[in-house]
Image (spheres, rainbow, N blue to C red):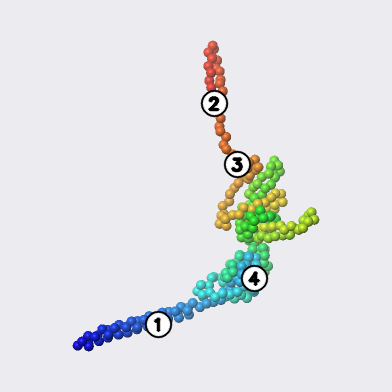
Amino acid sequence: MGKWKAFVPLALGLVIASFVGIFAYKWLNVQTTQKKIVSVESEAVPVAVAAADLPWGTKLEPEMVKTLPYLKESIPPGSFLDTESLKGRVVISPLRQNEPILECRLAPDSVTVGGISAIVKPGKRALAVKGDKVIGLSGFIRPGNRVDVLATITNPRNKREMTKTVLENILVLATGIEIEENKEGGKPNPVDVYTLEVTPKEGEKLSLAANHGKLHFALRNIIDKEIVLTNGASISGTLASFRPKKKKTSKTFTVEIIEGSKMTKKKFKL
């Protein structure tokens, strides 16, 4: 009887171990099957992406494009599955390295020439003005930024110099350096050039301000669309800024009133 008592716990342990082993085997089998199903459903597809950072206006060449694997169900709409169909297309918005090239980021097929002309919106014009490091905020103004244009001009009516905001929320299309000949016979001077996207009327204002005055750019927040109306700043008005308010002083005067033989005095304040 004592032998049977010792054998019963051992038998129960074997039975429990068997059940645990069978359960673990089935669970592992199910997990492996699920992974196989997922791997079959998540098939990778090559998608065309930018091989390097590409500025807008770039005409795509084969070496500028490569492919990266994307899960079939996560391919961005408008993507290209091969690089050959992108040859000669023009980029109308900047692309980062390894960013998918989408149809909405490209000019129509009919546009075969890159550069500024490919990215100017219909109804707008590209106009370049000369500047310097000051007007360009020491290089902080770059393509894609938006600026307000301020002009300092002498008013022909009163011969007074005034600074006025003449254009607001203007898109900067390009920035660059142009070599200009020195009129005095010295070495050629590098001149900063800024190309802005304007309407025909805005272009007239910008050209006039650039020829008859001095320009400055005020960098805007890219999402700030508010138009602020100003009266401009004159020299006298600017010098009057932050002056202490004058204290009001009252003057008194006395009036004598004569009525027959009677005279009275009355005081008044101004």
Is there CB contact under 8 Å for labels 3 and 4?
A: no
| Residue that sits furthest to the left in the current view | 1
The amino acid sitting under disc 2 is: Lys
Quadrant in the rendering for residue 22: bottom left
Which secondary structure, mark 3? loop
Depicted 239 relative to depicted 104: above or below: above
Mark 4, Cα crowd under 10 Å, few <14 / some 14-19 / many 20+, is some
Could you tell me if residue 238 is visible in this image?
Answer: yes
Q: For the residues carrying marks 1 and 2, which lies nearer the camera in this image? A: 1
* In the rendered image, the vertical position of residue 158 relative to residue 187, given as above or below: above
Task: Give the x, y percent position of residue 67.
Answer: 58, 75
Instruction: Name which quarter of the figure residue 63 lies in.
Output: bottom right
Q: Which residue is mark 1?
A: 29
Measured in 3D between alpha carbons, the distance from the residue under mark 2 to the one under mark 4, in whole angstroms, is 82 Å
Mark 2: secondary structure = strand
- Numbered mark located on residue 60 in the image: 4
Depth check: give the residue in front, 92 or 130: 130
Determine the CA span between mark 1 and mark 2: 105 Å
Residue that lies at the very extreme toward the front in this rendered image: 2
Question: Can you identify the residue that label 2 sits on?
Answer: 269
Q: CA distance from mark 3 to mark 4?
A: 54 Å
- Sequence-wise first label, 3 or 1: 1
Q: Is residue 25 left or right of residue 255?
A: left
Q: CA distance from mark 4 to mark 1?
A: 50 Å
**Where residue 138 sits in the image (x, y, percent)?**
64, 56
Distance (Cα) linking label 3 and label 1? 82 Å
Q: Which residue is mark 3?
A: 241
Q: Position of residue 88 (x, y in %)?
A: 66, 71
Q: Residue at x 19, y 88 (%)?
A: 1
> How many C-alpha atoms fall within 10 Å of the one at disc 1: few (<14), some, or many (≥20)?
few
- The secondary structure type at the circle numbered 4 is loop
